[in-house]
Image: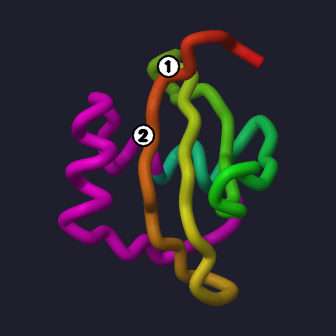
Amino acid sequence: MPFFIFLWTDVAEQHTAAHGVTRREFEEIVTQPTHTRLSRSSGHPIAFGQTSAGRYLVCVYEIIDNITVLPVTAYEPEKLP
């Protein structure tokens, strides 16, 4: 499992909380994704995966450097890929 430092801003907290996603869930998916890709609209990395509690989430973030991640948003997809 990779090591990341997550820079949680008030905006990131609000965006994830608006979708009922906790910091712990977000960090779990980004550090152990099922798969990843780049967003077609923003170019940001997206991590997909299932939490230990069974929720399937999509987590969008920015990579600041080799270990620093800036969360953008997260949500449960309408359809599973």
Asked whether 56 or 11 is in front, the reply is 11
In the displayed structure, 68 sits above or below 30; it is: below
Image spot of residue 70 (x, y percent): 46, 71
On the image, which quarter does residue 31 sit in? bottom right
In the displayed structure, 6 sits above or below 55; it is: below
Horizontal relation, residue 12 to residue 10: left or right: right
Which residue is disc 1 drawn over?
55
Image spot of residue 13 (x, y percent): 24, 55
Q: Residues within 10 Å of mark 2 (few under 14, many from 20)?
A: many
Residue reaching furthest to the bottom: 65
**Residue at 64% across, 89% down:** 65
Asked whether 36 or 51 is in front, the reply is 36
Image spot of residue 25 (x, y percent): 42, 40
Secondary element type, mark 2: helix
Magenta residues? 1-26
Horizontal relation, residue 29 to residue 24: left or right: right
Task: Tell me the quarter of the image containing the C terminus.
Answer: top right
Query: Per the image, is 70 magenta?
Result: no
Give residue 25's mark.
2
**Residue at 58% across, 43% down:** 29
Q: Amino acid at mark 1?
A: Arg
Q: Amino acid at mark 2?
A: Glu
